[in-house]
Image: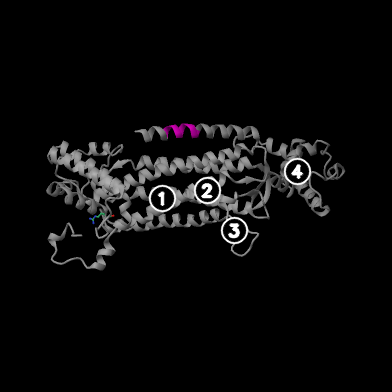
Amino acid sequence: MDKMWKGRFSKELDSRVNDFNSSISFDSRMYKEDIEGSIAHATMLGNQGIISKEDSACIVENLEAILADIESGKLAFDMTAEDIHMFIEAELTKRIGTVGKKLHTARSRNDQVAVDMKLYVKKELKEIKALLLKLIETLVKLAEENVETIMPGYTHLQRAQPITFAHYMMAYVEMFKRDYMRLSNSLDIMNYCPLGSGALASTTYNIDREFTAAKLGFAGPTMNSMDGVSDRDFCMEAASDIAIAMVHLSRLSEEIILWCSWEFKFVELDDAFATGSSIMPQKKNPDITELVRGKAARCIGDLNTLLVMMKGLPLAYNKDMQEDKEAMFDSIDTIKICLTTIIPMLSTMKVIKKNMENAAKKGFINATDVADYLVKKGLAFRDAYKITGEIVKECIEQDLTLDSLPLSTYKKYSDCFAGDIYEAIDLKTCVNGRKVLGGPSEEIELKHIALIKQFLTENKLYERLESED
Ligand code: ARG
């Protein structure tokens, strides 16, 4: 394809440079945003009398036809074009001649690519937000079914204190809720339209930036033309939000990998969401979760690419910024495929309550409650703690648990012990006694679940309203 800018040059671009320079192989996915941006621009040019109303209408009509032809498969991308922007403009000119050549009045590819990219990222982040709501919904359902499922909570991967499976799931709900809020926040911050910034110094034409910004769904135009074309904070923020969410998904995946092992056997994946081994017939592997854990690395890498790519750039546009796309797209694609796979995996996963409860019976996870029992009978915590440590030591030596240790042995350590110790250290009592805000008791968990359900309803409603806009 002929270069738009060939007038100033006396030689063709070397074919090796051509391939090196070109971005159409990856930016063609922004065709819709590019056309949308051009339609807003052309409409504004017509309204402002910068081009005639007829030319404006002709451009808009033909851009719409190009969009329809791309979507129906009638029009294929020309891979020799430099990028999607050049391709669409050239196609328009092919169709309507000189009128098509007027589209780029009062615009540069620099503000064009900035607006396309923002529109694209905005659209994708909204989809990721919707997927996060689905994930939260799935985890809440698991929580609701397991408010009474006692399991050990761990620190240092050592059994620590009794909790419920609901409490575990709701911990991840909080993480994904923050991810959702981070994305909402980023969407608000990026919601300003760079179109009209021109190459870097805006334009002498009397354009209407408020109009194009509103038509494209932004809160308003950006306030500095140099920043408008050279800002990629929105990519760095989006990639950062995604990387953090992927870290959360990766941690959840790691839990599930452990829980699927025979050492834990707390959960069993549905056959449709697990894989076998090519040699070991007994194997059922949690490949999905391992891949999610692995793919988190890509998203962290994508964020790194964007940060390092930007850190040394003088204002305003530099071609380095073309590199934003593959990193941003990879980060978006990766989290989307991870979410769409892990959600049904979680909703079909079987929770083996019995094994969780059995594991909770071992490991002296109610030792803190023995100490607390003594404190309630008047001892200072440090003294109670020391006595309990000695009792645990004796239990280990005699191969007993705190629940099976005879009262006479307890009494050897303190007169404060009475028959009510067994009730006090029953795992149910331990869990349900933790009624403080944020605790694992059934009463508090159900309140938390209700709050999250309200959050889901409000945000689903909001998303529906937004998509109707
Ligand atoms: N393909 C370019 C990019 O993705 C478009 C902007 C090019 N502008 C320029 N002056 N070379 O960044």
Relative to 107, residue 219 above or below: above
Q: Which residues are magenta?
A: 455-462
User: Which image quadrant is residue 317 in?
Assistant: bottom left
- Choose mark 3 or mark 2, whichever is in front: 3
- Quadrant occupied by the N terminus: bottom left
- Whole-angstrom CA distance, mark 3 to mark 2, is 18 Å
Picture coordinates of residue 435, whole percent (x, y): 65, 34
Residue type at mark 4?
Answer: Ala
- Whole-angstrom CA distance, mark 1 to mark 2, is 16 Å
- Quadrant occupied by the C terminus: top left
Going from N to C along the chain, the mark reached first, 1 or 3, is 3
Which residue is the site of mark 4?
384
Which residue is the site of mark 2?
342
Left or right side of 328 for 37: left
Picture coordinates of residue 83, whole percent (x, y): 26, 56
Identify the residue at the far right of this view. Answer: 408
As helix, strand or loop, the secondary structure at mark 4 comes to helix
- Choose mark 4 or mark 1, whichever is in front: 1
Colouring of the image:
one colour
